[in-house]
Image (tube, coloured by chain):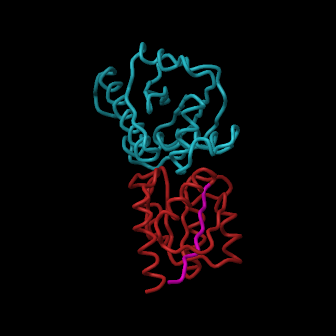
Chain colours: A cyan, B red
């Protein structure tokens, strides 16, 4: 991060590192396939989803900031099932594991990104999870996870 | 083969469930599998319960994993094997727990085959 690169080159690099972290966590933790998507595909993916969750985790250390994940409830339930080896139908509608998993997703992506890009000790705060009205997230990195929308925002303070 | 008694320490219930599941998939005989939300709860449990292997997160409220391991370092016989499972895989964090009798340092997300290898080695050590 201290290299004298142009701002655009640094942003491309940061975006690529985030893509790697998201793909790694999705594949290793949830057996999910993740691909970056553009605006048109994102809008199409979002049309079927009315209930969304957002998790955020703040980090401290040589770098400070926050990482947020926004995803439909349906994807959160699918990820819980994959994570725990359950059928989606086995999960009660308001199972607290779904919120917990949504927080852990942000936690693991953030941890992976920090480990690979910083290599120094950092502290993650407990994730905060809340319901949000839609998938509107301009400027976030957007993905299709098993064909379902997943958006991530990484905000680093002082960059 | 005597089943292994285990303790999972993590403030996330879904993570504790996942660790428990990977343990069950390992086919290593398991005895009691205890859970704790943080280091303080783990120490309270260990005061009255015999455990062969401890799996602990690092970032936790109340008492974090490093402080738990520091407390247990004064009790070398309290647990036969100590395993960290953390989102922080940095060399700097790993260095922090050197000298605290940590046998394995694993990164989240955790692969089932990694858990199988660890539990198999713990079983060899316990039954050695």
Left or right side of A8 for A59: right
In the image, what residue occupies the spot 40% across and 68% down? B117
What percent of the width, then of the height, locates residue A135? Answer: 56, 20
Q: Who is closer to the viewer here, B119 or B96?
A: B119
What percent of the width, then of the height, locates residue A106? Answer: 53, 38
Q: Who is closer to the viewer here, A43 or A66?
A: A43
In the image, what residue occupies the spot 65% across and 20% down? A133
Which corner quadrant holds the C terminus of chain B? Answer: bottom left
Q: Does the segment drawn in magenta span residue B4? A: yes
Number of numbered tags placed on the structure image: 0
What percent of the width, then of the height, locates residue B69? Answer: 56, 67
As drawn, the residue found furthest toward the top would be A40
In the image, what residue occupies the spot 41% across and 75% down? B121
In the image, what residue occupies the spot 44% across and 24% down? A142
Q: Tell me which corner region of the image, top left, top right, bottom left or bottom right, holds residue A53.
A: top right
Compared with residue B51, is residue B91 higher up or lower down, i.e. above or below? above
Q: Who is closer to the viewer here, B33 or A65?
A: B33
Compared with residue A99, is residue B74 higher up or lower down, i.e. above or below? below
Q: Which residues are magenta?
A: B1-10
As drawn, the residue found furthest toward the bottom would be B128
Q: Does the segment drawn in magenta span residue A26? A: no
Q: Tell me which corner region of the image, top left, top right, bottom left or bottom right, holds residue A13.
A: top left
Left or right side of B43 for B66: left
Question: Please, what is the dominant secondary structure of the magenta stretch?
Answer: strand
What percent of the width, then of the height, locates residue B89? Answer: 42, 52
Compared with residue A44, is residue A142 higher up or lower down, i.e. above or below? below
């Amino acid at each position: 991060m201290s290299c004298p690169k142009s701002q655009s080159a640094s942003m491309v690099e940061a975006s690529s590192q985030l893509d790697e972290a998201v793909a790694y966590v999705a594949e290793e933790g949830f057996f999910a396939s993740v691909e970056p998507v553009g605006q048109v595909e994102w809008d199409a993916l979002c049309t079927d989803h009315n209930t969304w969750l957002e998790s955020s985790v703040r980090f401290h250390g040589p770098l400070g900031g926050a990482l947020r994940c926004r995803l439909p409830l349906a994807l959160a339930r699918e990820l819980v099932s994959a994570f725990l080896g359950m059928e989606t139908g086995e999960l009660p509608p308001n199972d607290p594991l779904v919120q917990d998993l949504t927080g852990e997703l942000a936690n693991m992506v953030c941890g992976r990104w920090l480990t690979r890009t910083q290599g120094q000790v950092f502290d993650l705060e407990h994730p905060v999870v809340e319901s949000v009205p839609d998938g509107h997230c301009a400027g976030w990195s957007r993905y299709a996870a098993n064909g379902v929308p997943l958006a991530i925002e990484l905000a680093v303070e002082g960059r | 083969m005597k089943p292994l008694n285990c303790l999972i320490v993590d403030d996330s219930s879904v993570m504790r469930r996942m660790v428990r599941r990977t343990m069950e998939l390992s086919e290593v005989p398991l005895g009691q599998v205890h859970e704790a939300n943080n280091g303080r709860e783990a120490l309270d449990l260990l005061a009255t319960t015999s455990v062969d292997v401890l799996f602990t997160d690092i970032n936790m409220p109340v008492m974090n994993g490093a402080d738990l391991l520091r407390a247990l370092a004064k009790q070398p016989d309290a647990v036969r094997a100590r395993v960290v499972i953390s989102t922080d895989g940095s060399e700097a964090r790993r260095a922090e727990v050197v000298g605290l009798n940590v046998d394995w340092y694993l990164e989240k997300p955790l692969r089932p085959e990694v858990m199988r290898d660890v539990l198999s080695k713990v079983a060899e050590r316990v039954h050695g």
